[in-house]
Image (spheres, helix red, strand yellow):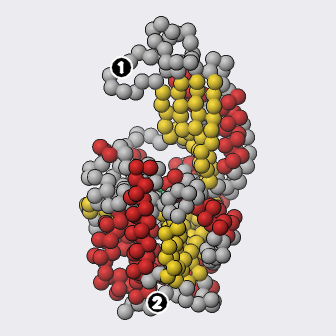
Amino acid sequence: MSHQAYIESNKERFLNELLDLLKIPSVSADSRFAGDVKKTADFVAERLKEAGADKVEVCPTAGHPIVYGEKFISADLPTVLVYGHYDVQPADPVELWHSPPFEPVIKKTEEHPEGAIYARGACDDKGQMYMHVKAFEAMMKTNSLSCNVKFMIEGEEEVGSANLGTFIKANKERLKADVVLVSDTSMIANDTPSIDVGLRGLAYMEVEVLGPNRDLHSGVYGGAVANPATILCQMIASLHDENNHITIPGFYDDVVVVSEADRAEMAKAPFSLDAYKKDLGVNEVWGEKGYSTVERTSIRPTLEVNGIWGGYTGEGSKTVLPSKANAKISMRLVPGQNSHKIAQLFKNHFESMAPAYVKVTVTEHHGGEPVLTPTDSTEFLAAAKAMETTFGKKPIPTRGGGSIPIIALFEAELGIKSILMGFGLDSDALHSPNEKYGLFNFYKGIETIPYFYQYYAEMKK
Ligand code: BES
Ligand code: MN
Ligand code: MN
């Protein structure tokens, strides 16, 4: 039986297994879900074993466990290291979901006429990760696996992969491979396949602006003591200038400038600004002057406030001049920039602009480095040919706006390049309420992955 025929006759079961996986709330950020995170790791390990993997292990870490499994066939064949994550983002605000985040339902939409699975993690990354488990099963059961495989599925991607770096450093021999294969990114559209050849890095900061030694009556003291919330807003507002350039001194110094020829090439990829605005419900887009929307979310660095709080935010009103105000601020980085250097530049700048009426402290959270991968490598050509086979169209090389910090570490620690063969859509609402993943996308991924193994093995000969 061909792998395609095997997939066709096991479609229903593949989907039901994914639905079961989506029912376990593996929220890595929230310690109340630690038991469920562990359960999810065990679930993935069991499915890997059933699919035919050897040496399956749920490896404990200082945080959530890493699932490892492998199938070795021959030292003459190349080895593919599959990376993915089984943890998910928190579901809140839960009240904005049309159906409970951990009770998956399938609904048809304009974009997904064949139906989409609505659940937290449907696309990011349980649905995409699970395609690899099922593609592996299909190759095993039809005797068509053409590469050695190693699986490394982690449970801390959404919280910065803090313990995965340690695991990689401690397991260099075990993780030896020729290429890392990842499905945790998006493509342009279901009829426009693309492969990300770059990802942005990340520097994530937390700031605190401290004023008086206690919350004050805003009538008794307001007007005479600086309000930390006001000062914080002024400081944050000053981080962009009138052209929406970031004002931190030195911020752009190391940015690799993309050539006009490359920008012109990128601009050829289909993109509808109208559809983009409509999807987001905004009248106008915003961003750095001189760059298109696609460029602003791929080749240019950015700075965002992720959260801001201080003073009274409860029901009704309370007259208070808060003692402090805080914000979480992140910067997306592009090739050339280094997350630690940018974090330091931010800290120096933010602290130095603090007026005398407040004390400002800046701390650094996790970060990650940007990546760029070649389009003329064997692995890229194999991935492109695989997608061309199943979509009937050559995939367009694109640069993703999100971050997967571990990708840069694979290269730095193991010397292996990654292929970011994602099957999601940006509109699948990753990290948002009502996250979804198209059934078309799930099955297309399962169908495409075996071709990657086949072409990669052929091209590597
Ligand atoms: N799968 C995403 C990254 C992604 C999504 C890349 C879409 C390209 C296109 C990943 O799970 C993620 O959300 N990463 C975080 C970084 C992490 C350190 C929390 C991100 O990009 O914010
Ligand atoms: Mn992800
Ligand atoms: Mn994510």
Residue plotted at (55% across, 89% down) = 73
* Residue for badge 2: 144
Question: 141 above or below 229?
Answer: below
Dividing the picture into quarters, in which one does residue 381 lie?
bottom right
Q: Is residue 313 visible?
A: yes
Give the CA distance from mark 1 to mark 2: 66 Å
- Whether residue 288 sits left or right of residue 133 in the image: it is right
- Quarter in which the N terminus is drawn: bottom left
Task: Using the image as rendered, state which of residue 332 and residue 406 is in the foreground.
Answer: 406
**Residue 436 image position (x, y, % from top left):** 35, 58
Task: Using the image as rendered, state which of residue 425 and residue 266 is in the foreground.
Answer: 425
Residue placed furthest toward the top: 220
Question: 401 above or below 290?
Answer: below
Residue plotted at (26% across, 50% down) = 98
- Whether residue 317 sits left or right of residue 147 in the image: it is left
Nearest to N terminus: mark 1 or mark 2: 2
**Residue 80 image position (x, y, % from top left):** 57, 78
Residue type at mark 1 is Ser
Which label sits in the foreground, 1 or 2? 1
Secondary structure, mark 1, is loop
Residue plotted at (28% across, 52% down) = 100
- Whether residue 152 sits left or right of residue 166 in the image: it is left
Label 1 close to label 2 by CB (< 8 Å): no
Question: 441 above or below 370?
Answer: below
Residue 317: image tag: 1
Dividing the picture into quarters, in which one does residue 418 lie?
bottom right
**Residue 143 image position (x, y, % from top left):** 44, 91
Cβ at disc 2 under 8 Å from ligand 2: no
Task: Using the image as rendered, state which of residue 443 and residue 23 is in the foreground.
Answer: 23
Secondary structure, mark 2, is loop
**Residue 431 image position (x, y, % from top left):** 42, 51
Residue type at mark 2 is Ser
